[in-house]
Structures are given as C-alpha cells and as structure tokens.
Image: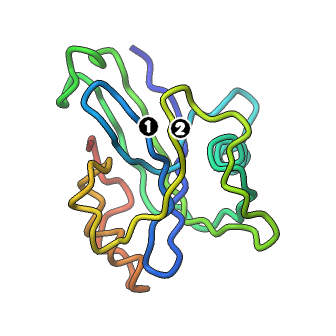
C-alpha cells in the first residue's frame, strides 16, 4: 500500500458548502470535490482539473487549510478499502465569476450531481469527512480555523 496524493476544494458561499453528491451501497453521500494528483501536476493544477471534471467550473485556489489522511483499514469500510491510503490537501477555493455551469466534464462513475449544502446542517447529511464539520462552520463564519494544519487520519 503506497499513499496516494489527492486534493479537495473547500468552496463556501453564503454559508453553504459546494459538495459532490455520490451514491454507494449504503445510499447517498456527500463530499468535497476531490481527486488524485497526477504525475507532473502541482497540487493547484490537480485541484483545478478535478473541480472542472466533477463540477464543471473554473476555480481560484486559495490557501491550504488542512492536510488529512485516510487509511482505509482504520475506518468503517476496512473490508472494502483496507489497502487504501490517501494524503489529501484541502484548499479554500472560490468559483471563477465567469464559470457557473455545475455540469462536470468527466464526473466520477458514482457521482450523481453537485449541490450546495447549508453549513449549519452538514451533520444531518452523510458528509465526509464528518470530523471537519466544526472547522467548516468556522470557515463559513470567517473565523480562523482552530484545527491544526494536519488533522490526521480522519473519515
């Protein structure tokens, strides 16, 4: 098992979080627009490509908020993802004013759409990673994050 480098876009507007809606064997789930970094790409280039593929819009990449790991054998889907190890870099992003189609050019096979979820209600959704919800609320309120840069192995 080798760690894979990935990126995620934290896009908050009017106290709503832009998420990708997916479906698995347990039903609907939501996550950040995210994906793996390809060889030769910077983290910023990977993030811009992934958001264009999944959401269909151009973004302006802001500061790195958090670094998170996901080591599958430590979490609820260990039987299916026991060999997965991802290091994810989460960046605060904004949508380019001139690009708002929200139709991904190459969405993931399990992706069903893109939605805005109210930050204050994230906990009622099957949103991943749940551990970041309090820190996302801080971001939505313009408060400096109380989370460390490295948030650990979370799901």
Helix, strand, or loop for circle 1? Answer: strand
Q: Which residue: 48% across, 64% down?
A: 116
Work out how far the residue at label 1 is from the one at label 2, CA to CA, in angstroms.
6 Å
Q: Residues within 10 Å of mark 2 (few under 14, many from 20)?
A: many
The residue lying toward the viewer, choosing from 30 and 2, is: 30
* Direction from residue 49 to residue 111 in the image, left or right: left
Query: Residue extending furthest right?
Result: 98
Helix, strand, or loop for circle 2? Answer: strand
* Direction from residue 42 to residue 26 in the image, left or right: left
The vertical placement of 25 against 14, above or below, is: above
The residue lying toward the viewer, choosing from 108 and 62, is: 108
- Counting residues from the N terminus, which is met first, the one under dot 1 or under dot 2? 2
Image coords of residue 125 (percent x, y): 26, 55
- The tag on residue 26 is none
* Direction from residue 105 to residue 144 in the image, left or right: left
Image coords of residue 67 (percent x, y): 42, 51
Image quadrant occupied by the N terminus: top left
Image coords of residue 66 (percent x, y): 42, 57
**Do the numbered discs 1 and 2 sit on residues whose CB atoms are within 8 Å?**
yes
The residue indicated by pointer 1 is 87
Q: Which residue: 53% across, 34% down?
A: 5
The residue lying toward the viewer, choosing from 29 and 152, is: 29
Q: Which residue: 35% across, 39% down?
A: 69
Q: Which residue: 31% across, 69% down?
A: 135
The vertical placement of 103 against 61, above or below, is: above
Image quadrant occupied by the C terminus: top left
Q: Residues within 10 Å of mark 1 (few under 14, many from 20)?
A: some
The residue indicated by pointer 2 is 6
Image coords of residue 91 (percent x, y): 54, 59
Q: Quadrant of residue 101?
A: bottom right
């Amino acid at each position: 098992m080798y760690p894979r480098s990935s990126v995620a876009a934290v896009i908050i507007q009017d106290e709503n979080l832009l998420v990708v809606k997916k479906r698995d064997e347990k039903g609907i789930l939501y996550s950040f627009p995210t994906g793996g970094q390809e060889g030769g790409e910077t983290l910023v280039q990977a993030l811009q490509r992934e958001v264009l593929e999944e959401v269909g819009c151009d973004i302006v990449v802001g500061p790195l908020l958090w670094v998170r790991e996901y080591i599958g054998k430590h979490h609820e889907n260990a039987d299916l993802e026991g060999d997965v190890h991802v290091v994810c870099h989460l960046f605060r992003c904004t949508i380019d004013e001139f690009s708002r189609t929200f139709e991904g050019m190459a969405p993931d096979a399990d992706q069903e759409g893109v939605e805005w979820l109210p930050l204050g209600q994230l906990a009622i959704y099957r949103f991943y990673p749940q551990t970041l919800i309090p820190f996302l609320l801080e971001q939505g309120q313009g408060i400096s994050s109380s989370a460390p840069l490295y948030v650990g192995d979370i799901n």
